[in-house]
Image: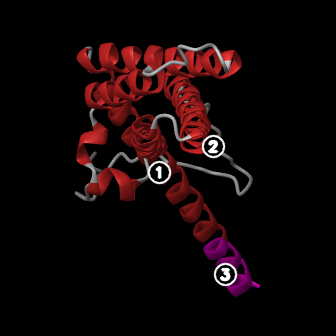
Amino acid sequence: MSTNDGEVEENVPAVTLTSRTRIRRRPDPFLVACRCFSFVTCLAAILCIVVNILSAVRSFRHGSDIFDGIFRCYAVVIAFLVVLAETEWSFIIKFWKVSEYWVARGMLQIFVAVMTRAFPDYFGERKELVTFQSMASYLLLACGLVYVVSGVLCIGFLKRSRQKQEITVEQAAKDLEGLERRRAELEQLLLEERV
């Protein structure tokens, strides 16, 4: 906008912030649901770890089926990888890129579920262990199927983009708080200089 003197002024909206302004954002419901599902998947994988450890100890103790014990040890290691993938630590994602893809993650979970369910107790000696195996394996199998279907529907990509957006908004809020503090400090200095 030009004035009578020929100077040009810009129309900049004045932003006034009080020193007590707090920006509160509700968490994204989609990301909350993803975190809850990840927690359930971790619990299912931990149940598979416990069941496989109990089965391996039983196999090695009786000495009846050493191959079943070795098989259970592999199932424990792979189930531990499932738990690590569900934590989504940047260190894990950086060195194990395949865990970023939900279809691969779901197939790994299905594999662990099948390994946990394999070699049931045919003699009926430990019915509670077989029940525990079934519960853990079917729960992890269901989680794996949900991951595979969600991966095919590109839900993982949507989750990553929303996570990036959430981080960007949080960083902007922190920057705004820093600017607000700096403005309050400058106003305080100006008041002290006037006095």
Residue 70 drawn at (x, y percent)? 41, 43
Tell me the chief SS of the magenta region.
helix
In terms of secondary structure, where does tag 3 sit? helix
Residue 191 drawn at (x, y percent)? 72, 77
- The image quadrant where one finds the N terminus is top left
Amino acid found under the numbered disc labelled 2: Ile
Magenta-tinted stretch: 185-195
Is residue 189 something one can see in this rendering? yes
Residue 100 drawn at (x, y percent)? 30, 39
Q: Nearer the viewer, residue 54 or 155?
A: 54
Camera-nearest label, 3 or 2: 2
Residue 157 lies in what quarter of the image?
top left
Q: Give the residue at mark 2.
A: 23
Q: Give me the disc on residue 172.
A: 1
In terms of secondary structure, where does tag 2 sit? loop
Amino acid found under the numbered disc labelled 3: Leu
Vertical order, 95 against 74 (above or below) = below
Question: How far is mark 1 from mark 2, CA to CA?
Answer: 10 Å
Mark 3 and mark 2 residues within 8 Å of each other at the beta carbon = no
Question: Along the polypeptide, which appears first: circle 3 or circle 1?
Answer: 1
**Disc 1 crowd, CA 10 A, few/some/many (<14, 14-19, 20+):** few
Q: Give the residue at mark 3.
A: 189
Mark 1 and mark 2 residues within 8 Å of each other at the beta carbon = no
Mark 3 and mark 1 residues within 8 Å of each other at the beta carbon = no
Q: Nearer the viewer, residue 87 or 61?
A: 61
Camera-nearest label, 3 or 1: 1
